[in-house]
C-alpha cells in the first residue's frame, strides 16, 4: 500500500447477541510487516506502510466488540460469516445470548466494567487487553468453550503486558501523539503572536512620535484620534488572544490528565476513575477471578488452556498445529519456571517436528514451521537445563 493511505477499512457486521450493526475497523492486507519473533511467537517489531501508524499495535483490532452490548469475538472469517454458520446458530447463539445479556444486566458486573472501559484513543494497550478479556468471558459462557482459542487469547494478553514494558515498540497512544501535536501547534501560535505584538508596539510608537501622519488631510484633527482608537481596539483584541492562548496552554498542562494515561503498570497514571490500570485490574479480579493482573498470570492461564487442548485429545492429530501446541506448552512452562514440564513438552515438540519433516519429505512450505520449532525446542531445552544446573 502507498505510504499515505489508511491501513484500515470498515467491515459491517450484525451482532449475534443484540442485532446491533457495527462497523469494525479492519487492517488491510499488507498494511504492515512483522520484524522478528520472540520464542513464544510474539512479534518483536513491525513496520507499517504508512509511518503515521508506527505506534499502533494490530492487536487493538484483533477482537470485534459490539458497541452496544459488548459481545466480543475474534474478528476473523468465522465470526464475519456467523449467519451462515449452522453449528453456531443452532448450538451456540442462544446460549451465549442468554448468558451474555444476563451478565450485561449486572450494572456493576465484570462484563460492564470491561465494556465501559474501552478507550482505544487514550488507552490503546489497555483497551486491547480488555477486549481480549471480553472475548474470553463470552467464550467461557459456552457449554464447550474452545480451549485453543482461550489459550491463544490469554497468550496475546501476555504479549501486550510484555510489549508495553519491554521498550521494543514505542507505546505512545494516538491520543497522546495528538496532544503532543497540540502543544507544538499552540507553541507556533504563541510565537506568531509574539511577533504580532512587536509589530503592534512599533505601530503605537510611530503614532506617538508622529500623530499627524494619521491625519487624512493637513487640517484633519479627528484622524489621529480615530486611528489611535482603532489601534487600541486592535490591542484589546490582541490581549484577549494572548490570554486565550495562555488559558489553552494551562488547560493542556493542568486539566487534561485523562488524556495522559498510557501504561499498563501501576505507576501513578490514572485509568478512567481508577488511580492506575493495575488498580482497575485488581477491582476486576475481585469480581472475575480469571482476569490476569500481569504477564505471568496471563501466561499461566494460557498454559492451562494449551494443556487442556493437548491432553484432552482435542489438539490436531498431526502437523504444524500439533507441533506448535506442544512447543508452546514447553515454552510457557519454561518461562514460568517449571523445568520438568518444559523439557517434557519441548522434547515432544522436537520429536513431532522431526516426524512431520520426514513425512513431508522435501516440501519446504509444509515443513518450514516444523523446522523452526525443532530448532527452538533444542535451544530451549539446553537453556532450561543450564538454568536448572545453575539453580541447583
Image (tube, grey):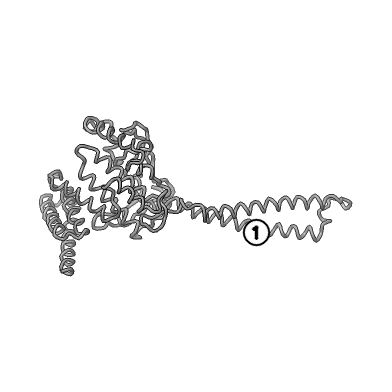
Whether residue 43 is situated above or below residue 150 in the rendered picture: below
Residue neighbourhood size for the residue with mark 1, other residues' Cα within 10 Å, grouped as few (<14), some (14–19), many (≥20): few
Q: Quadrant of the C terminus?
A: bottom left
The residue tagged 1 is: 195
Q: Nearer the viewer, residue 130 or 22?
A: 130
Rendering coords of residue 275 (x, y %): 40, 53
- When asked about the image quadrant of residue 73, the answer is top left
Residue that extends furthest to the right in the rendered view of this protein:
219
- When asked about the image quadrant of residue 144, the answer is top left
Whether residue 184 is situated above or below residue 115 in the rendered picture: below
303 displayed left or right of 64: left
**Going 35% across and 60% down the picture, which residue do you hit?**
167
Q: Nearer the viewer, residue 15 or 392?
A: 392
Count the marks: 1
Rendering coords of residue 198 (x, y %): 68, 60
**Going 17% across and 63% down the picture, which residue do you hit?**
384
- When asked about the image quadrant of residue 186, the answer is bottom right
Rendering coords of residue 271 (x, y %): 40, 51
Rendering coords of residue 351 (x, y %): 11, 55
**Going 22% across and 59% down the picture, which residue do you hit?**
335
Q: Nearer the viewer, residue 198 or 233?
A: 233
Q: Secondary structure at mark 1?
A: helix
Q: Nearer the viewer, residue 157 or 325?
A: 157
Amino acid at each position: 500500500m502507498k505510504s499515505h493511505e489508511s491501513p484500515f477499512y470498515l467491515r459491517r457486521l450484525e451482532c449475534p447477541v443484540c442485532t446491533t450493526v457495527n462497523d469494525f475497523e479492519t487492517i488491510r492486507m499488507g498494511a504492515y510487516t512483522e520484524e522478528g519473533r520472540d520464542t513464544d511467537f510474539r512479534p518483536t517489531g513491525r513496520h507499517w506502510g504508512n509511518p503515521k501508524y508506527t505506534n499502533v499495535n494490530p492487536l487493538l483490532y484483533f477482537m470485534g466488540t459490539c458497541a452496544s452490548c459488548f459481545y466480543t469475538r475474534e474478528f476473523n472469517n468465522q465470526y464475519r460469516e456467523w449467519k451462515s454458520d449452522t453449528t453456531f446458530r443452532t448450538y451456540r447463539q442462544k446460549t451465549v445470548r442468554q448468558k451474555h445479556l444476563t451478565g450485561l444486566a449486572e450494572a456493576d458486573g465484570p462484563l460492564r466494567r470491561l465494556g465501559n472501559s474501552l478507550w482505544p484513543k487514550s488507552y490503546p494497550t489497555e483497551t486491547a487487553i480488555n477486549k481480549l478479556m471480553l472475548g474470553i468471558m463470552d467464550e467461557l459462557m459456552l457449554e464447550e468453550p474452545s480451549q485453543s482459542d482461550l489459550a491463544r487469547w490469554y497468550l496475546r494478553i501476555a504479549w501486550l503486558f510484555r510489549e508495553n514494558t519491554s521498550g521494543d515498540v514505542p507505546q505512545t497512544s494516538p491520543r497522546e501523539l495528538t496532544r503532543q501535536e497540540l502543544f507544538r501547534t499552540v507553541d507556533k501560535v504563541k510565537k506568531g503572536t509574539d511577533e504580532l505584538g512587536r509589530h503592534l508596539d512599533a505601530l503605537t510608537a510611530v503614532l506617538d512620535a508622529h500623530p499627524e501622519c494619521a491625519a487624512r488631510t493637513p487640517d484633519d484633527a479627528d484622524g489621529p484620534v480615530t486611528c489611535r482608537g482603532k489601534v487600541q481596539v486592535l490591542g484589546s483584541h490582541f490581549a484577549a488572544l494572548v490570554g486565550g492562548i495562555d488559558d489553552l496552554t494551562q488547560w493542556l498542562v493542568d486539566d487534561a490528565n485523562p488524556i495522559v494515561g498510557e501504561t499498563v503498570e501501576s505507576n501513578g497514571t490514572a485509568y478512567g476513575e481508577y488511580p492506575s490500570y493495575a488498580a482497575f485490574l485488581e477491582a476486576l479480579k475481585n469480581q472475575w477471578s480469571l482476569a490476569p493482573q500481569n504477564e505471568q498470570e496471563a501466561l499461566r492461564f494460557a498454559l492451562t488452556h494449551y494443556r487442556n487442548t493437548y491432553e484432552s485429545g482435542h489438539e490436531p492429530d498431526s502437523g504444524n498445529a500439533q507441533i506448535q501446541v506442544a512447543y508452546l506448552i514447553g515454552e510457557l512452562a519454561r518461562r514460568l519456571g517449571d523445568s520438568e514440564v518444559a523439557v517434557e513438552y519441548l522434547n515432544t515438540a522436537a520429536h513431532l517436528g522431526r516426524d512431520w519433516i520426514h513425512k513431508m519429505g522435501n516440501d519446504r512450505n509444509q515443513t518450514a514451521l516444523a523446522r523452526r520449532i525443532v530448532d527452538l525446542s533444542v535451544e530451549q531445552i539446553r537453556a532450561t537445563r543450564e538454568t536448572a544446573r545453575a539453580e541447583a
